[in-house]
Amino acid sequence: MKKIIISLLIAGAAIAANAQDKALLETLVKKGMLTQQEAAQIAKESVAVTPCTKTTKSIKLFGGGRGYYEWSQASVRNPSDAPSQAQKSGFELKHIKLGVKADVGAGWSATVITDFGTEGADLNYIDKAVASKKIDLDYINGTLEFGLRKVNMGYEQTTCDFGLLTIDRSVATYFFTRGNAYDDVERNFGSRTTGVFWDGNITQVDGLYYGVSVVSGTAQVDNAVNDLISGVSDSNSLSFFVNAGYKNVADVKGETISYDAGINFGYAPRGAKAFNGQEGSIWGINPYATLNWRGLTTIAEFFFQQVEDYANNDGITRSPLGANLTVAYKMDIGEWGAIEPVARFSFIASNGLGVSPLSQRYDDINLYDENYAFDNAMTVFAGVNWYITPAIKTSLGYEYGYYYDSVNNSDNKGYRAYDNTIRAQVQVLF
């Protein structure tokens, strides 16, 4: 058994840094853990990863997985009929990520991240694929990237999947950045797309940063991988995103407070696509602010968009707005790690566009009915994270959702939907 374990460890070390194998084997022989013959056999059978170019300086492997158990129940009520109800429960592997980052020299690097979880399936298992170039000149400092990634729109949306304080993203984040939950309109105004991305810093002002993106311009949704990889075949326009912010650390009466505040802006001439194929423009802003003090973390963000609605109103401009507010407090509990209570409030006022996220989650309720495209939504999440180690996190949370006012039938303003969800999560990183 000892030889098997040592062999596996050495094989893993060979993948990460083959040049260290010889020294490691010699050390194990000197300590009497392996004989010279055993060491020679292991070295012979080891598999080495060799870069295709001699200028490659390093290859880094990383990844992780997170999955959860979910129980949820929804009910829809209207003024005249009996309420409809649906319930579901089960396990889901949300993300199973494996990434490779190569430093190929001269400030260039390449990153490819795959995701074999349920969300990755909608992306055809491509999470990110970019070539990056670091630039550091007198007045220009930052990173230029080419490829597939998220644009800077939505603070919670651009947060790493493994770095979320809550178990899942909010209803507002999904609505404003990842496509309309009502199936008449497809929108992608903050998720993955192909293009050119610049993330820079103002070297003369410590903490001041900005970004610019020029990306494919059609309405691209996360479950349409062909659109994500190539927007050439059906796009005659580009979308543009810019952002700016300031982050720093302040010392207030001996207490350290870190903060980050900024704003994202985007314009997509063909960002909204109706079920009948007509396309309209979207522009939107997303101011945000975060504050960290001791173990307290507060995150607030606001969304405002103007969308040409060709699905139901022949191009009439809609102006939806929404917000997220998240508060968490992380406490060290010694050898048991750390615990972190967390709460989040989220809301949407769709201004007639309609939101019906439950239609994608429950098969037993006909939420595609025109009366069940709701004008407003509100959710409240409360839970706790337990960081057993920095690499292992478990979470338990409850979310209540409330959706009201039909957007397509003025006589049915009394329609309501309620959603109760409990999730228990395990996350492991490497």
Image (spheres, rainbow, N blue to C red):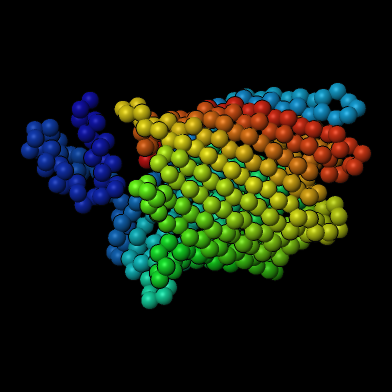
- The quadrant of the image that shows the N terminus is top left
Camera sees residue 19 = yes
Quadrant assignment, res 235: bottom right
Residue 140: give x, y in percent of width and height: 42, 73
Using the image, determine if residue 48 lies above or below residue 136. Answer: above
Please state the total of marks drawn on the protein image: 0
- The quadrant of the image that shows the C terminus is top left
Using the image, determine if residue 132 lies above or below residue 47. Answer: below
Residue 385: give x, y in percent of width and height: 47, 32
Camera sees residue 53 = no
Which residue shows up at 13% across the image and 37% down it? Answer: 28
The residue most toward the front is 253
Using the image, determine if residue 197 lies above or below residue 358. Answer: below
Residue nearest the observer in this picture, 105 or 342: 342
Which residue shows up at 29% across the image and 48% down it? Answer: 16
Residue nearest the observer in this picture, 289 or 267: 289
Which residue shows up at 31% across the image and 56% down it? Answer: 58
Using the image, determine if residue 53 lies above or below residue 348. Answer: below
